Image (spheres, rainbow, N blue to C red):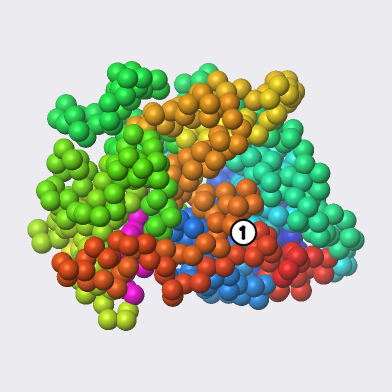
C-alpha cells in the first residue's frame, strides 16, 4: 500500500482541527513513520496503535475541569472564572504546553479509532474474535469522543469514516457542523455495533477496556441527553446553524426520543439480569452495629432484605465503599466501566484538593449550602418538612460523640447536620468531622477533628481564603486510611465512570416523560422490536433499589403516578446519588434547561469569618452569601463557544450563538 501517514487519513492537521506540527511530530507518534501495511502487519503494532487511541481518555475524563467544579454543588477557587462566566472563544481551558483546546483532542481520538477500524483486518496474527473485540473497543472510543464534544458544543463536524482526500483544497477539507440528531444516530449505531462485538466481562488486567455493558451504558447516557429539553424541541436554539444556514437542532418536540432513551437503559438492565452482571453494591450491617446507627424503623422496609428493604444493608458503608477504595473495581458489581490509570489520578487529585491542611492537603474544595440542604433526613423527609415538626434544627451542638441522639456526629458539631440520610455522611465533610488518617506514621494526625473556624489551621487566616470557602468540603472519595502527611498514603480508588446506579436513574427518568397510555415500538441493540410505555412498576423497580441501598423510604404511589412530582423528586435523587461524579450535576442542569435558574442563584455556605469564640461560634452556621464569588449563567452558556483559533483553521465552522 502507498506510504501514507495515518495522521492525514481522517483529519488533515493543517486544515481542520489541530496544528500540522502536532500531528507530524515523529518523536511523539511512532506510527506516523510507518505505512498502514506495516503498522497493521504485526500484533505488537496493532496493540500499540489501539493503546495509543486509548490515550484520549486522558482528556475524556469525566472529572476534567471546568465541568466537575462548575455547577451549583461545588466550588473551587481555580474555577472562579467559570463560575462567574468569565470565559469566551478566546479564553478557554487548554493544555498547559500548547495553545490547543483539550476538547479538540477528541478528534485525534476519532482519527486513531477510525484508522484502526478500517485497517485492523490487515493483521494476519489476529484471530477473527480478536479483531471483532478490538473493533468494538475502537468504536466505543470513537463514540465516546463524539459524545464528549456533543455534550459541550452541541452539533459538531462528523468526520467521514473512509477518510478525506488529501488533494482537496483547504475549503473542501474544512467540514461544516452536522445536525445534532444525525450525530446522535451515528453514536447510537456505533455503540450498538460495539455492544454486539464486545464481551460481557473483562479480566482484572483489562478492567479499563470497554465491555458490552459499557457500550450500552454510554448509549443510555447519550440518548437520555438527546431526549432532554436542551436538544428536544428547544426553540431557544433556533439560531444554531451551519455555514449554509441549515438548522442544526430540531425545533419540534419528539416524545419518542424518551422512549428510545428508556429502551437503551432497559437494554443494560436486561443484560444485567440475563448475565447476572450488575446490581447496586451493598454491605450487610456488622454484628456490632447499634440500633440507633440503623435507619429509623419502618414497618415496610426494616424487616425486608434488599431490594425490598434494608434489613441486610448498611446504607452508609454500602454507598461510600464504592468510591473510597474499600471495594476493588473488579469486585464491584455496580461498576460498568472505569478509566483505570487516569481514573485513579483524577480521584487522587480530588483528595488532594479536599483534604485539610492538617493532613497536608490543599484544603480548597468547597461544597455549597444548596447541596447540603438537598440531602434528606434519615426518615426520607426533606429538611423543610422536618423543620415543621421540629426534627430539623439549625441551632445547638452535639454534647457527646456518637450518642443515640446523634449517631453519626462527633462532639461539638452543629445539629443542622444531625439525623441526615446516610449518603450525607458518606459524602460531606462538615465543620467538625473526623479525618481518621490511619496511615499517618504520626499519631498527632490520626483521628483529627477538623474545624473551619477563622484563625484555626484549616480555617480562614487573615484575609487569605486558604480553606473551603463555604466551610464545608467533600469526603465522598476519602478513605479512613488516607493521609498526605509523612509516612501516609492514599488508598487506590476506582473511578465510577459508568455505574449501574446511573442507569437505573436514567431508566426511571425516561419512562416518566412518556404520556400515560402511549405505546412506542423501539428497536433494541440486538435489532429486536420492544414496546416502551410509562410504567410506574418499572420506574419503582429502578428507584426503589436506589432508595433501599440509601436507607430511605421509597416514593409513594402518588408520586410514581404524578409525572410532575416524580420529575422533581427524580432531579433531587440524581443530585444526591450522583453528587461529585462524572460532572453529572453540571450536565444535568444543562440538559434539563435548569441552569439559567439554578446556576444564577447566589453561592451560599457558612460564614468563614467567624472564629471559634464560644460567644459567636453559632454565627458560623448561619446561611451566608459568598460575596467574593458572583455566579452568573447566561442563555448562550448552554453551548460552549468554539475556540477562535479552531474557527480560523476551519472556515466552514460556525460559532455557537452569543459568542
Q: Is residue 472 magenta?
A: yes
Q: Quadrant of the C terminus?
A: bottom right
Work out whether 234 lies above or below 601: above
Along the viewing direction, whichever of 102 and 314 lies nearer the viewer: 314
Give the residue displayed 21% in from the left and 47% down from the top. Answer: 409
Q: Which residues are magenta?
A: 465-477
- Residue ID for mark 1: 596
Q: Is residue 132 visible?
A: no
- Res. 304 visible in picture: yes
Magenta stretch mostly in which secondary structure? loop
User: Percent position (x, y) of residue 107?
Assistant: 67, 57
Residue occupying the point 65% across, 34% down = 513
Q: Decide whether residue 74 is among the magenta residues.
A: no
Q: Determine the residue positioned at 77% across, 41% down.
A: 253
- The answer to whether residue 335 is above or below residue 532 is below
Closer-to-camera residue (250/214): 250
Q: Nearer the viewer, residue 331 or 616?
A: 616
Position of 31 with respect to 494 (left or right) is right
Amino acid at each position: 500500500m502507498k506510504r501514507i501517514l495515518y495522521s492525514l487519513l481522517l483529519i488533515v492537521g493543517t486544515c481542520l482541527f489541530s496544528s500540522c506540527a502536532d500531528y507530524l511530530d515523529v518523536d511523539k507518534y511512532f506510527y506516523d513513520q510507518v505505512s498502514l501495511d506495516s503498522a497493521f502487519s504485526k500484533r505488537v503494532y496493532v496493540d500499540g496503535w489501539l493503546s495509543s487511541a486509548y490515550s484520549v481518555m486522558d482528556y475524556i475524563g469525566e472529572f476534567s475541569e471546568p465541568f466537575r467544579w462548575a455547577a451549583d454543588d461545588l466550588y473551587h477557587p481555580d474555577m472562579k472564572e467559570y463560575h462567574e462566566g468569565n470565559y469566551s472563544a478566546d479564553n478557554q481551558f487548554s493544555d498547559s504546553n500548547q495553545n490547543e483546546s483539550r476538547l479538540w483532542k477528541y478528534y485525534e481520538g476519532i482519527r486513531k479509532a477510525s484508522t484502526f477500524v478500517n485497517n485492523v483486518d490487515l493483521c494476519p496474527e489476529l484471530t477473527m474474535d480478536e479483531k471483532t473485540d478490538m473493533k468494538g473497543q475502537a468504536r466505543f472510543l470513537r463514540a465516546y469522543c463524539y459524545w464528549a464534544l456533543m455534550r459541550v458544543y452541541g452539533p459538531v463536524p462528523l468526520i467521514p469514516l473512509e477518510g478525506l482526500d488529501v488533494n482537496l483544497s483547504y475549503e473542501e477539507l474544512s467540514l461544516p457542523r452536522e445536525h445534532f440528531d444525525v450525530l446522535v444516530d451515528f453514536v447510537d449505531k456505533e455503540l450498538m455495533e460495539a455492544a454486539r462485538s464486545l464481551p460481557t466481562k473483562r479480566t482484572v488486567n483489562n478492567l479499563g477496556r470497554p465491555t458490552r455493558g459499557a457500550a450500552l451504558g454510554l448509549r443510555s447516557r447519550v440518548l437520555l441527553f438527546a431526549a432532554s429539553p436542551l436538544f428536544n424541541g428547544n426553540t431557544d436554539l433556533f439560531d444554531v446553524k451551519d455555514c449554509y444556514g441549515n438548522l442544526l437542532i430540531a425545533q419540534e418536540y419528539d416524545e419518542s426520543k424518551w422512549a428510545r432513551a428508556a429502551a437503551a437503559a432497559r437494554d443494560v438492565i436486561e443484560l444485567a439480569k440475563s448475565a447476572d452482571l450488575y446490581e447496586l453494591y451493598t454491605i450487610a450491617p456488622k454484628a456490632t452495629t447499634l440500633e440507633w446507627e440503623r435507619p429509623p424503623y419502618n414497618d415496610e422496609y426494616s424487616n425486608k432484605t434488599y431490594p425490598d428493604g434494608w434489613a441486610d444493608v448498611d446504607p452508609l458503608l454500602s454507598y461510600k465503599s464504592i468510591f473510597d477504595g474499600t471495594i476493588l473495581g473488579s469486585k464491584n458489581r455496580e461498576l460498568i466501566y472505569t478509566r483505570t490509570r487516569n481514573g485513579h489520578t483524577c480521584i487522587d487529585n480530588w483528595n488532594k484538593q479536599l483534604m485539610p491542611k492538617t493532613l497536608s492537603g490543599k484544603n480548597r474544595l468547597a461544597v455549597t449550602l444548596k447541596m447540603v440542604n438537598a440531602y434528606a433526613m434519615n426518615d426520607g423527609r426533606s429538611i423543610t418538612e422536618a423543620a415543621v415538626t421540629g426534627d430539623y434544627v439549625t441551632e445547638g451542638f452535639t454534647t457527646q460523640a456518637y450518642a443515640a441522639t446523634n449517631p453519626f456526629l462527633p462532639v461539638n458539631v452543629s445539629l443542622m447536620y444531625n439525623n441526615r440520610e446516610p449518603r450525607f455522611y458518606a459524602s460531606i465533610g462538615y465543620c467538625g468531622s473526623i479525618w481518621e488518617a490511619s496511615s499517618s506514621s504520626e499519631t498527632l494526625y490520626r483521628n483529627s477533628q477538623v474545624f473551619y473556624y477563622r484563625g484555626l489551621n484549616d480555617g480562614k487566616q487573615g484575609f487569605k481564603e486558604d480553606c473551603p470557602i463555604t466551610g464545608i468540603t467533600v469526603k465522598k472519595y476519602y478513605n479512613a486510611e488516607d493521609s498526605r502527611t509523612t509516612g501516609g498514603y492514599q488508598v487506590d480508588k476506582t473511578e465510577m465512570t459508568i455505574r449501574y446506579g446511573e442507569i437505573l436513574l436514567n431508566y426511571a427518568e425516561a419512562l416518566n416523560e412518556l404520556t400515560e397510555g402511549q405505546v412506542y415500538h423501539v428497536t433494541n441493540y440486538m435489532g429486536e422490536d420492544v414496546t416502551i410505555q410509562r410504567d410506574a412498576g418499572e420506574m419503582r423497580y429502578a428507584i426503589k433499589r436506589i432508595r433501599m441501598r440509601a436507607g430511605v423510604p421509597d416514593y409513594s404511589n402518588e408520586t410514581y403516578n404524578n409525572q410532575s412530582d416524580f420529575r422533581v423528586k427524580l432531579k433531587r435523587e440524581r443530585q444526591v446519588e450522583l453528587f461529585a461524579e462524572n460532572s453529572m450535576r453540571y450536565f444535568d442542569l444543562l440538559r434539563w434547561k435548569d441552569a439559567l435558574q439554578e446556576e444564577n442563584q447566589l453561592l451560599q455556605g457558612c460564614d468563614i469569618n467567624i472564629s471559634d469564640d464560644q460567644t459567636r461560634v453559632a454565627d458560623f452556621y448561619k446561611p451566608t452569601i459568598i460575596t467574593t464569588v458572583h455566579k452568573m449563567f447566561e442563555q448562550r452558556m448552554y453551548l460552549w463557544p468554539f475556540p477562535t483559533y479552531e474557527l480560523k483553521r476551519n472556515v466552514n465552522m460556525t460559532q455557537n450563538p452569543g459568542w
